[in-house]
């Protein structure tokens, strides 16, 4: 090689190195890595841990929403399209959180909120179409965004007592656990309102799939494995695919919904049809009816539903934001994370994006703390999580391999995680304990998140009135309580009017 060629090569190498250094310095400066005592490698590691800790949503969200899509007039929506939409919306909003708020917080379709869409708005007493339900999700996001922009969100946050906020999360956890147990066939109708398995016993290979997956999650969680939920779903899904290939297990019900095989799969057969890698199907996008719910239901019912969705989204985000900040040592002396306004704004916009994308409200995930535990301190980790979500869109058809018996393990376990907050309730103080108990109990027992919140709010007002503590009732709570009283009496009121 000639000297000129060598010099040219050296100059090129130095130029490339300088360009790489400038890029690295640019990333470090933009995300304030040195100020937060982090590094690019540390942020990538934290982002990957967060993704694997919450990637179960790509399986669980389709398992919750698909029944609502079918019953709600969205026949072209499939589990694969829900998974693709979930990945796209979650990925874009998480990247936006990283770039705008520079905070290690990831977003995706919210657990509890998706259950409310499916089992309360569409399959429940309101009977909305899938598009009408997504319309309410969109308006809930609009309301929260306005609350952030106007500064009113803090006022609403302060109006609902802290003990009731905790109870709402706990109640949703129990509700989700019940949904998971029913989807897996572990709990079913029987001689009593509900019973364990088939005649009080575990029977059938699909139930074994659930038990194996759930035990794997429990063991890995105790062993502090970050991706415990995802690994549990993968293990139980692989077992399901193997069992199906050997035993050819049919569905539990026929096309009319009649039970024809008690030991069959409850929702879907774990067998892949076609290629596992395909272009994403975005059939969920455009599945939205902005004003249909307002014409189908009384205005008071619509307002209460939007308010209930807002509460479930609103308070989880506040707690998650502070929890992630505390885990990473990112809170100031007042307990606030940096760029609080930007964090709340992106989270609020994510609710709107979830409705527009037809995948339910997107919200901040407490699993982000797992990434913080692995070293994440900045928004760079969020960008990594978002890119992982976008990449996963091309593997969405694999979702159809995951039976409800496998994905339901996550529902039950997430119920446990949410239940742990019950210790924050003052059970020795009846003024707090009774509203909290009614909130927690009524969600699973009435199969309605809205009913649980309503019972808790009304009970809180009654308790304060009984003790003569009118000054402790925020004016907004009077409005909320009155709306729920009307909501619970809508049937008789409508009968009287007609």
Image (cartoon, rainbow, N blue to C red):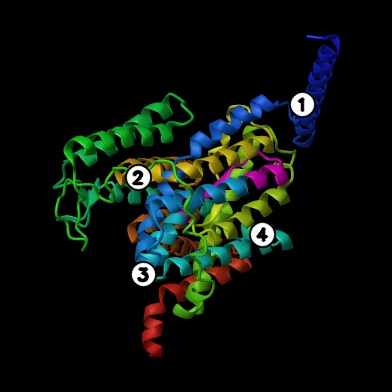
Count neighbours of disc 4 (C-alpha within 10 A) and say few if under 14, some if 14 to 19, many if 20 or more.
some
Q: Residue 218: horizontal and vertical position, in percent?
A: 37, 31
Please tell me whether mark 3 sits on a helix, a strand or a loop. loop
Q: Is residue 26 above or below residue 153?
A: above
Location of mark 4 (residue): 153
Q: Mark 1 or mark 3: name the one nearer the start of the chain.
A: 1
Q: Residue at x 60, y 30 (%)?
A: 46
Q: Quadrant of the N terminus?
A: top right
| Residue 234 colored in magenta in the image | no
First in sequence: mark 1 or mark 4? 1
- Residue 161 visible from this viewpoint: no
Secondary structure at badge 4 equals helix
User: CA gap, disc 3 to disc 4?
Assistant: 30 Å
In x, y percent, where is residue 407?
36, 43
Front-most of 46 and 391? 391
For disc 3, the marked residue is: 125
Q: Which portion, as a residue range, is magenta?
A: 95-113
- Residue at image position (64%, 31%) is 376
The front one of 416 and 280 is 280
Q: Secondary structure at mark 2?
A: loop
Q: Residue at x 26, y 46 (%)?
A: 269
Circle 3 packing at 10 Å, graded few (<14), some (14-19), many (20+), is few
Q: Nearer the viewer, mark 2 or mark 3?
A: 2
Pointer 2 or 3: first along the chain = 3
* Residue that badge 1 annotates: 20
């Amino acid at each position: 090689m000639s000297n000129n060629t060598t010099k040219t090569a050296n100059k090129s190498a130095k130029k490339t190195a300088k360009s790489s250094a400038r890029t690295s310095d640019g990333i470090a400066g933009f995300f304030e890595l040195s100020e937060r005592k982090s590094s690019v490698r540390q942020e990538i590691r934290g982002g990957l841990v967060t993704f694997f800790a919450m990637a179960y949503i790509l399986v669980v969200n389709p398992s919750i929403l698909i029944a609502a899509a079918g019953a709600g007039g969205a026949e072209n929506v499939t589990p694969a399209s829900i998974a693709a939409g979930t990945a796209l919306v979650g990925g874009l909003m998480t990247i936006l959180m990283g770039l705008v708020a520079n905070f290690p917080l990831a977003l995706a379709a919210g657990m509890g909120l998706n259950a409310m869409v499916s089992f309360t708005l569409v399959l429940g007493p309101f009977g909305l179409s899938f598009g009408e339900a997504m319309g309410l999700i969109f308006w809930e996001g609009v309301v929260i965004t306005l609350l952030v922009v106007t500064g009113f969100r803090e006022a609403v946050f302060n109006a609902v007592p802290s003990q009731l906020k905790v109870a709402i999360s706990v109640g949703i956890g129990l509700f989700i656990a019940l949904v998971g147990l029913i989807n897996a066939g572990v709990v079913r109708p029987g001689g009593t309102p509900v019973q364990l398995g088939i005649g009080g016993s575990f029977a059938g290979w699909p139930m074994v799939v659930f038990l194996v997956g759930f035990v794997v999650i429990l063991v890995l969680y105790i062993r502090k494995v970050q991706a415990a939920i995802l690994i549990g779903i993968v293990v139980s899904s692989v077992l399901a695919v193997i069992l199906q290939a050997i035993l050819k297990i049919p569905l539990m019900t026929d096309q009319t919904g009649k039970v024809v095989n008690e030991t069959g799969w409850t929702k879907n057969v774990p067998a892949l049809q076609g290629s596992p890698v395909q272009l994403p199907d975005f059939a969920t996008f455009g599945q939205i009816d902005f004003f249909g719910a307002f014409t189908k239901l009384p205005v008071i019912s619509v307002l209460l539903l939007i308010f209930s969705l807002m509460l479930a989204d609103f308070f989880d985000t506040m707690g998650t934001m502070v929890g992630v900040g505390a885990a990473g040592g990112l809170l100031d002396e007042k307990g606030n994370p940096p760029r609080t306004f930007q964090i709340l704004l992106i989270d609020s916009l994510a609710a709107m994006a979830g409705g527009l994308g037809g995948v339910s409200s997107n919200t901040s995930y407490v699993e982000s703390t797992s990434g913080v535990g692995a070293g994440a301190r900045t928004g760079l980790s969020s960008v990594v999580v978002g890119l992982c979500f976008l990449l996963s869109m091309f593997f969405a058809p694999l979702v159809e391999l995951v039976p409800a018996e496998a994905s339901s393990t996550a529902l039950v376990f997430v119920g446990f995680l949410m239940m742990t907050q019950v210790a924050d309730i003052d059970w020795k103080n009846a003024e707090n304990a009774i509203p909290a108990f009614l909130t927690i109990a009524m969600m699973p027992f009435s199969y309605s998140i809205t009913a649980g919140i309503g019972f808790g709010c009304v009970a809180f007002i009654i308790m304060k009135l009984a003790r003569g503590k009118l000054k402790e009732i925020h004016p907004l709570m009077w409005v909320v309580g009155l709306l729920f009283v009307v909501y619970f009496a809508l049937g008789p009121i409508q009968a009287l009017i007609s």
